[in-house]
Amino acid sequence: MTSDPIGAPQDGVGDDSGGDSGNRSGSGSGSGVGDGTRAVRAGVPEARLHAAPLPGPVFASHFHLPGDPAGAEYSYGRDANPTWRALEQAIAELESPDVPASALVFASGMGAIAAVLTGLLRPGDTAVLPGDGYYLLGSVREHLETAGITVRTAPTGTDEVYGLLPGARLLWLETPSNPGLEVCDIRALAEAAHRHGALVAVDNTLATPLGQRPLELGADLSVASATKALNGHADLLLGYAAARDPRLLEPVAKWRKTFGAIAGPMEAWLAHRGLATLHLRLARQQRNALAVAHALRERPEVSGVRYPGLPDDPAHPVAARQMRFYGCVLGFTLPAGRPAAERFLGALRLVDEATSFGGVRSTAERRARWGGDDVPEGYIRMSVGVEDTDDLVGDVRRALDEAAGA
Ligand SMILES: *Cc1c(COP(=O)(O)O)cnc(C)c1O
């Protein structure tokens, strides 16, 4: 596919209702509207006379609670908060517009991941994790193994994972993967995992629920760092887990309450506020990412440009089947290595050198500087923002010229 004007529907993904029926109860948006409409309405309460359209953050460590506390919706601030609830409803609507679902928000993406893995797995269980996913999965693996859980790993997008499923309790996928941008077939893997009686969780950080809906593709849980593209403004950390089966979230909620990885009301409110522009941001970021990817490919000093939205990217065929937007992250290598990569990053003016991704301002970094990823010294992970496409492409071209001339 080529770059699309903002708001144009994406190719490759049809109406994915998959025979499921029913509407989310109590939802302000639900099914029957487009993703952009859903994003501006998600979790927003019914209009009330003289009330704010999106109620402000509720700052409370406890709630007024006389008498018998049984059945109280709000009691103590570690259990529930109305500002989380509104964001959780919004995320559930976006992750699963056509079938009721629920979500839980956390202090960070890692808080959500820890809650799902340690909430659902028991000593003696086996989990299958990507070997090339978010760099902290290695550390997560150590913790799981210490707790008596067996961990098997396979690279994202390879068939190796199918052989690891017998006897597994949980399959964890990350697609597209960070930082390698490999993609795996969620639907096919979920079917295979379910045949073996394993649950399937997908790290949906890179795509966001407007880019990909794992629950519609058969996954049991969609888990993400909302710190990145979902919030999109690089001003908070937050995570979430969403599922259609409320029983799956019960131990996850209990873990949150017990270990206290709770979201701040201000963070939850800011993320909810930002959801209204998620659709616009993703459309512009995809256009910018494609334009930058094409510009990089014209350069002899650049190799290995990866972006799942590029029609001839190895990940594109699967990505086109399951993604609505291809995201804001692209990867490429300056084979001349670290000095060339550092000169390039230093010469950029519209792209800040920083880690993380998904924000409205473009960022890039040399991933090997952290030492945790299996990438070449000159590998750059770039996150495109919502700048004017020509400005961004011009900045990248000029920085490459300067890096070559130095
Ligand atoms: C950043 C990231 C996380 C961790 O999220 P935090 O909000 O930083 O805790 C998990 N998975 C992926 C794919 C990420 O990029």
Image (spheres, rainbow, N blue to C red):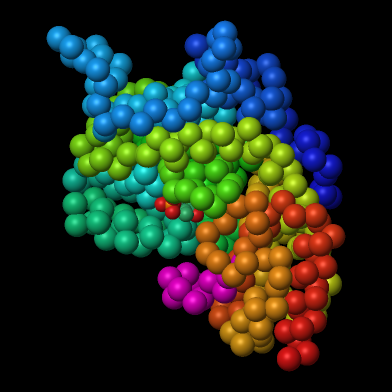
Comparing 296 with 124, the one in front is 296
**Residue 258: which quarter of the image?**
top left
Comparing 257 with 118, the one in front is 257
Residue occupying the point 47% across, 70% down:
373
| Left or right: 253 in relation to 368 | left
Q: Residue 318: x and y, percent?
A: 66, 47
Q: Residue 324: x and y, percent?
A: 69, 39
Q: How many marks?
A: 0
**Residue 88: which quarter of the image?**
top left
| Left or right: 266 in relation to 401 | left
Span of residues in magenta: 364-374
Name above or below for residue 60 compared with residue 11.
Answer: above
Query: Is residue 215 visible in the rendered structure shown here?
Result: no
Residue occupying the point 76% across, 70% down:
396
Q: Residue 380: x and y, percent?
A: 62, 71
The stretch drawn in magenta includes residue 323: no
Residue occupying the point 53% across, 71% down:
367
Residue occupying the point 49% across, 72% down:
374
The stretch drawn in magenta includes residue 371: yes
Tell me the quadrant of the picture where the C terminus can be found: bottom right
Outermost residue on the left side: it is 67
| Left or right: 271 in relation to 397 | left
